[in-house]
Image (cartoon, grey):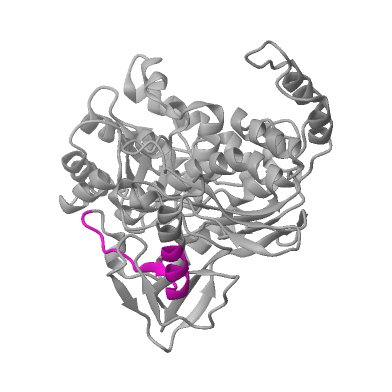
Amino acid sequence: MSALAELYRPSLAALTDLYELTMAHGYWVHGMHEREAAFYLTFRSNPFNGGFTVCCGLERIAEFLAAFRFADEDIDHLRSLQGADGQPLFQEGFLAWLAELRFTGDLDAAPEGTIVFPHEPLLRIKAPIALAQIIETPLLTFLNYSSLVATKAARVCLAAQGEPVLEFGLRRAQGVDGGITASRSAYIGGCAGTSNVLAGRLYGIPVKGTHAHSWVMCFDTELEAFERYAEAMPNNCVFLVDTYDSIQGVRHAVEVGKRLRERGHEMAGVRLDSGDLAWLSKEARRILDEGGFPNAFVCASNDLDENIISSLKREGATITVWGVGTRLATAYDQPALGGVYKLSAIRDEAGTWHPRIKLSEHAIKVTNPGILQVHRHLRRGEAVADAIVDELYPVENPRLIVDPMDATRHKHVPADTEIVPLLEPVFRAGKLVNLPPDVHAARQRLQAQLGLFYEGIKRFVNPHEYPVGLEPGLHQRKTQMILAARQHPPFD
């Protein structure tokens, strides 16, 4: 059974916005619901003012599409909905069609753990238009938040410079699924473990945890609390030392650690959860070393994020394990990725594809037409540029890309690059043809991906802008469509 099915009933088809269904109903009424269309999912800016984004959520999308169907209770609920005139909102014939609906389309997507950038398609759907419309909202739901938290986790782990980061955010997450998704995404983003036991069971993520302040407060003294914990959990002794006085707490941990060692066990470390973490960690390290525990680690928590961790590193903090909760699980400084799902082509009855474009007063909201793919150019093991291409007009090896936000900015691509398509087949005609990587493979992929890119894109302040642009032919066709639409708008 999939992790998604363990959390929910077999289908989440009704997890969509009503306007997706009203449009699908409209397509059905006009007999165009089976007309094939292409949509792509993208986003417009990197989160956290950063230089990259981690694509995450595909495994859950694949589980969702494989189980896609409207249950009887979903159809009954839709049947009960009424329009402004008090009459049924949907026709019975449409509901009968909906009850038989399954995912029959194609899905191409960037594997989880792939580094991606604004304007690039993260996934592409080719399917009957009514079906493709209905799945818009859940696809965005699965991918937006997952990618946001995975990106935050990657930034936190970069700040920790290879030291383990533990995700502790369940109690502060936005609901049950927010907590599960955050734990999964944070692990893909590089975290070494989670406090979330259910996520550990569902996804095989290492679970970590020790005791809270309440344990210490249940006993007459902190020393007694540590002793009782060591007796109960001799193989899991990380003592939380700041219930009363952090320095005295470390001394008590050393005292109990010596007794624990006499019984054949070893204290793993201490955790600081408040105060001046830089100074306290140095003092804790000194006391542990002088007490004979040079291998015991100092863990820190207390509303950490990549910026605070970087600051503590600069101050010489001796923390070697980082517990990150609220600011990771909630993506504290940016609540949403802002992904969008846009129609880019539609097929006529003769089988010919026709590109589509959406205009806007804001250039960033103008869409790209065609059957879109991304070609990543690699040179000597380094990613040097990404070209957005239209598979309807194949170009073997474009040597130039055009900035989608500024047509005067061109980037020449070296001739000796290797091209790697970012979007890979996942479904064909509704059949799962490539199983998405699990969380462990996705986590490994991200680490390999981070190694492909110039260090400047990983900076937290004023990161380098990685070159992403349109293949010149696509740029030219897009420009022509914009000019034609503005000269002769479709509604004239």
Residue visible at 28% across and 49% down in the picture: 49
Q: Position of residue 38 (x, y in %)?
A: 62, 55
Q: Quadrant of residue 347?
A: bottom right
* 152 sits left or right of 427 in the view: left
Quarter containing the N terminus? top right
148 vs 217: above or below:
below
- Residue 319, horizontal then vertical, whole percent: 28, 47
Left or right: 94 in relation to 197: right
Residue lying furthest front in this view?
A: 492
Most foreground residue, 138 or 453? 138
Q: On the picture, is 406 further left or further right than 77?
A: left
Residue at the spot x=49%, y=61% of the render? 114
The quadrant in which residue 148 appears is: top left
Give the percent coordinates (x, y) of residue 44. 39, 51
- Highlighted range, magenta: 461-480
The answer to whether residue 45 is seen in the rendering is no
Question: Closer to the camera, 29 or 254?
Answer: 29
Location of residue 192 in the rendering, given as x and y in whole percent from the top left corner: 46, 50
Q: Is residue 491 above or below residue 295?
A: above
Magenta highlight on residue 466: yes
> Is 302 part of what is drawn in magenta?
no
How many numbered circles are shown?
Answer: 0
Residue furthest to the bottom: 416
Q: Considering only vertical position in the picture, is 211 above or below 57? A: above
The image shows residue 435, relative to residue 375, as above or below, that is above
Quarter assignment of residue 406: bottom left
Q: Is residue 78 visible?
A: yes
